[in-house]
Structure formats: structure tokens, C-alpha cells
Amino acid sequence: MNASALDQALLVGLVLGAVLLLALWTRSAFVGWRRRFTETARVSLADMFVFIDPAALFKLNFAAFVALPLAAWLLTQSAFLAVLAAVAGAVTPRVTWAVLRRRRMDRLVVQLPDGLTMMAGAMRAGAGLQAALELVVKENPAPLSQEFSVLLREQRLGLPLEESLRGLGERLKIEDVSLFVSALTIAKEVGGNLSEILERLASTLRAKAVMEGKIKALTSQGKLQGIVVGLLPVFLAGVLYAMDPVAMAPLFNTYYGWGTMTVIAVLLLLGGVFIRKIVSIDV
């Protein structure tokens, strides 16, 4: 075997080794992604009392991760847009979970003052804390009834009240719930009229909700302006591409165009963050 044949054999061996290492790395990355996705989905869905097979959600997300960039490539012939579509397919589940959780927490915040008033009335009538919790679970819809049912089950299993309340606060991480946990914990330690404490807390939370509603109404115009300004460049780019695809093609098919769109995206993101900081007011 001459030197040329040895060089070719060595090159083929290196290529095969590189392909094998890439395949092993891809498989390991895929297995790790699937494990992290299913674990995160299981915990997130359990926190929202949604019982769906995480493996089925992973298959759906993987299908979107593959189909979206392929569709973007077939429609636009742009590698940059295909990569953006792949990123969108990868982050969509997390964004969806965050939106669903935010909506669920908003509903719980709305229901909490009425639940506290119900508890205060039951305790004023002579019922104990456990009976008052049972009344809230029975008479209120989800998600308040779901979260209080967990608290009630932990009490029936013998878990100390302080630990149950601490778990409730850590699970929800809402300021209103933290106030409720602090009120019950302090009343448990130092005593006092718990029904009166709960009624005052309910009144405070209602006043807080009214103030937050007024702030949202006053800042809604600024938020809408930020959304319009942020979407305007995307809309204009779509219109210009529809009017003259040849002139707009370098924006999607060249490194200069990709760099320009990256800078525009970063600037729009920074503008959105600044507008959000300006119109977000904590009560």
C-alpha cells in the first residue's frame, strides 16, 4: 500500500470517527433534552393541576422543532429564518407554560379575597381553621380550591401548619399569598382574633386589586404603543418583501442582512424592556 492510499485511508477513518462522535453527541444531547423537558413539564403541569403525559408533549414539541424550520426554509429559502423558526419551536413550550401559569395566578389572586372573607365568616360563626378551609375548597372554583385542598390534605396527614403554609408560599410565589401565609403564621405563634385578621387582609387585598386595576388602565396606552412600535418594522419588512422580493432578498440570504436583522431584533428587545420598565408600577 503506497503513501497516497494510506493518506486516503487515514482521512476516511478520521471522517468516520468524526461522524461517529457527532452521532454520539447528538444522541446524548437529544436524550438530555428529552429528560429535562419531561421533568420540567411534569413539575410545571403538576403545579397547574394539569395531568397530561409529558412524553406526548415532548413528541409534539419535537415535531414542531423539526417542522417549523423546514417550512420556513421551503417558503423563504432563508437559513436565518429557518434558524429563527427552530428557536421559536424550542422556546414555545416554556412561553406557553409561563402564560398559562400567569393566567392561573391572576385568577387565584382575584379569588383569594373572597376566600379569606368566607374563612373569616366561618371562623366567626365558631368553625375551626380546618373547617374553614374545607368550606373554601367546597364553595370556590379552581385554582383557589385546588391550592387550598392541597393545604387541607397536608393538614390531615399531620404536617405542621407552618410547613404547609411555607410550602404553599414557595409553590405559588405570589405576594398576596405570602401575606396570607404570614398572617396565619403570626396568628399561630402570637395568637389573636384570626377571623378579624383574615377579614382585614381580605379588605387590604381588595383595595390593592383596585389600585392595580387603575394602574393597568392608565398604563395600557403605553403598553399598546410599545407593541405597535415593536411590530411596525416587522410589518414594513413583510410589505416590502411582498412588493419587491428581489430587492429584499439580501436581507434574508446574506451575512450582512442577517447581521442587520440581529441588530434590529436586539434594539427592539431593548426598547420593549425599557417600555415595560416604564409602565410597570409595583403597588
Image (cartoon, grey):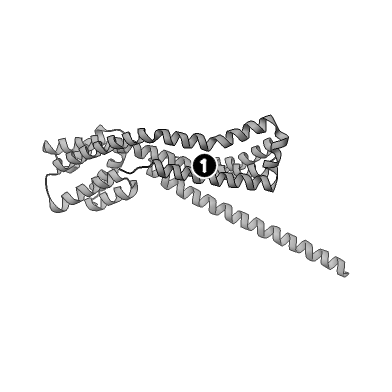
* Front residue of 229 and 171: 229
**Left or right: 159 as drawn, with respect to 196:** right
Residue visible at 33% across and 36% down? 215
Say what secondary structure mark 1 lies in.
helix
Q: Is residue 44 above or below residue 248?
A: below
**Left or right: 213 as drawn, with respect to 64:** left
Q: Is residue 121 visible?
A: yes
| Number of dots carrying numbers | 1
Residue 65, x across and y down, in percent: 59, 43
Q: Which amino acid, mark 1?
A: Thr
Residue 239, x across and y down, in percent: 63, 31
Q: Quadrant of the N terminus?
A: bottom right
* Front residue of 252 and 256: 256
* Front residue of 102 and 248: 248
Q: Mark 1 points at which residue?
A: 92
Q: In which quarter of the image is residue 46?
A: top left
Residue 121, x across and y down, in percent: 15, 35
Q: Residue reaching furthest top? A: 243
Q: In which quarter of the image is residue 235?
A: top right
Q: Residue reaching furthest right? A: 2
Q: In which quarter of the image is residue 175?
A: top left
Q: Quadrant of the C terminus?
A: top left
Residue visible at 28% across and 36% down? 211
Mark 1 packing: few (<14 Cα in 10 Å), some, or many (20+)? some
Q: Can residue 53 be seen in this view?
A: no
Residue 176, x across and y down, in percent: 28, 43
